[in-house]
């Protein structure tokens, strides 16, 4: 298959119509020049480089073999970004699939690519890994439409499909039971049921492949001030209710919404980790590899997209969370400058050959963060 990909790209057969201009000028790591790179703060011996650019608004990614797939929500596209020469820079940006409805996520299982659009979840096959075979498209699940949070994250695990669906509003009692929830379906889209509820906007889903633990980010409501309610990391379990819209964090009651305190928060699942309000945690990654120092093994990396209405901006960084102590530590920061200027907004995190790839939907780039012992 790898030889086929190389021949396709070299010859131009079946790919030239959909190849975008190479995302990097000379397609070599040494040639990259990006002024933002020098402004990102990282722990000792970690470095950052540019993997791809000019991708519109890349959100969540999938790493498969020597190809990164990235959903560009503003362009309605899934890009295939091959790295066939293994230099950790995308060789080109190829349109894997186009004309999608705000695609936000992509996953792969058993020959199928699963794509989360605002209005539906679909799956499609590919004979060359660079282009979707559109004749194989299957529409699996229709999504609730209208209002509020429109991203749909699809994650495949243990022969089942998990889909996160945000709320239709800032804070309200939903009429559709799938809103503000994570649903679980068969791989063909049948037998869908609410798996966990009371989750205002759990954009990021991540499984610990060894234990099956499902971690999720959750974005708290607005208009309660700069510091409440907290954003959250949750451990998702079937049948659990995490409280929204009546409760937040460690079962604190939302007295602004439920003024009469008609709903108790005592039986809800509390947040696993509370985060600074308005950080907007989106993507997350459970790190279980050995390329980074041992202290990072078995921890979470979380992308903070950054606040939009806080009096003093916060977020715009990658944090690391120790799952035993629940300590949250800045890992990659600097997209929010000291003068308040924003030079990037991290979204998705995926591991690729021992490094972390981080998408930035504000600048259209994908960064690579790696460890290099000196």
Image (cartoon, rainbow, N blue to C red):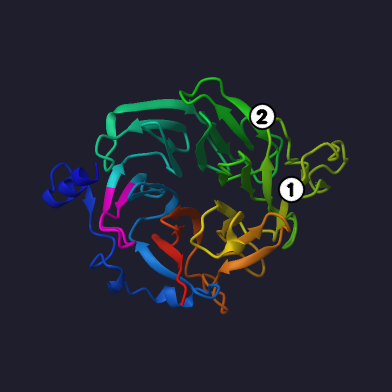
Magenta stretch holds residue 6: no
Alpha carbon distance from label 1 to label 2: 24 Å
Q: Which residue is mark 1?
A: 271
Disc 1 or 2, which lies upstream in sequence? Answer: 2
Magenta stretch holds residue 81: yes
Residue 184 placed where, x, y %?
Answer: 58, 29
Q: Which residue is mark 2?
A: 175
How many other residues sit within 10 Å of disc 2, few (<14), some (14-19) or many (≥20)? few
Which quadrant would residue 198 be assigned to in this image?
top right
Residue 109 placed where, x, y %?
Answer: 42, 34
Residue 128 placed where, x, y %?
Answer: 24, 39
Residue interval drawn in magenta: 79-94
- Residue 292 is left or right of residue 17, and the answer is right
Instruction: Identify the residue at the far top of this view.
Output: 191
Residue in front for this viewpoint, 249 or 126:
126
At a point 54% along the width and 26% down the height, the residue shown is 185
């Amino acid at each position: 298959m790898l030889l086929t990909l190389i021949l396709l790209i070299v010859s131009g057969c079946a790919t030239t119509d959909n190849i975008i201009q190479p995302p990097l000028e000379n397609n070599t790591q040494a040639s990259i020049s990006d002024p933002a790179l020098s402004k990102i703060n990282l722990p000792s011996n970690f470095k950052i480089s540019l993997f791809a650019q000019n991708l519109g608004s890349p959100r969540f990614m999938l790493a498969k073999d020597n190809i990164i797939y990235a959903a560009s929500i503003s362009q309605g596209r899934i890009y295939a970004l091959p790295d066939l020469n293994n230099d950790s820079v995308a060789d080109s940006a190829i349109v894997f699939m186009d004309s999608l409805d705000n695609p936000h996520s992509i996953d792969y299982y058993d020959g199928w690519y699963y794509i989360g659009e605002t209005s539906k979840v679909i799956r499609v096959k590919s004979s060359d890994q660079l282009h979707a075979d559109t004749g194989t498209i299957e529409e699996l699940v229709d999504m609730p439409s209208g209002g509020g949070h429109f991203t749909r994250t699809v994650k495949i695990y243990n022969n089942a499909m998990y889909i996160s669906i945000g709320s239709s509003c800032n804070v309200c009692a939903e009429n559709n039971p799938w809103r503000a929830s994570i649903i679980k379906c068969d791989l063909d889209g049948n037998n869908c049921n609410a798996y966990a509820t009371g989750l205002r906007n759990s954009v990021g889903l991540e499984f610990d492949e060894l234990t099956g633990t499902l971690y999720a980010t959750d974005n708290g409501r607005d208009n309660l001030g700069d510091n409440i309610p907290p954003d959250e990391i949750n451990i998702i379990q079937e049948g659990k209710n995490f409280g929204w819209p009546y409760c937040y964090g460690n079962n604190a009651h939302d007295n602004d919404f439920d003024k009469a305190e008609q709903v108790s928060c005592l039986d809800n699942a509390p947040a696993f980790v509370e985060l600074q309000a308005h950080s907007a945690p989106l993507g997350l990654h459970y790190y279980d590899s050995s390329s980074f120092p041992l202290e990072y093994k078995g921890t979470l990396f979380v992308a903070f997209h950054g606040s939009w209405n806080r009096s003093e901006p916060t977020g715009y960084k990658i944090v690391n969370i120790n799952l035993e102590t629940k300590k949250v530590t800045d890992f990659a920061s600097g997209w929010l400058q000291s003068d308040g200027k924003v030079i990037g907004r991290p979204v998705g995190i995926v591991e690729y050959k021992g490094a972390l790839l981080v998408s930035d939907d504000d600048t259209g780039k994908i960064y690579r963060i790696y460890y290099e012992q000196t």
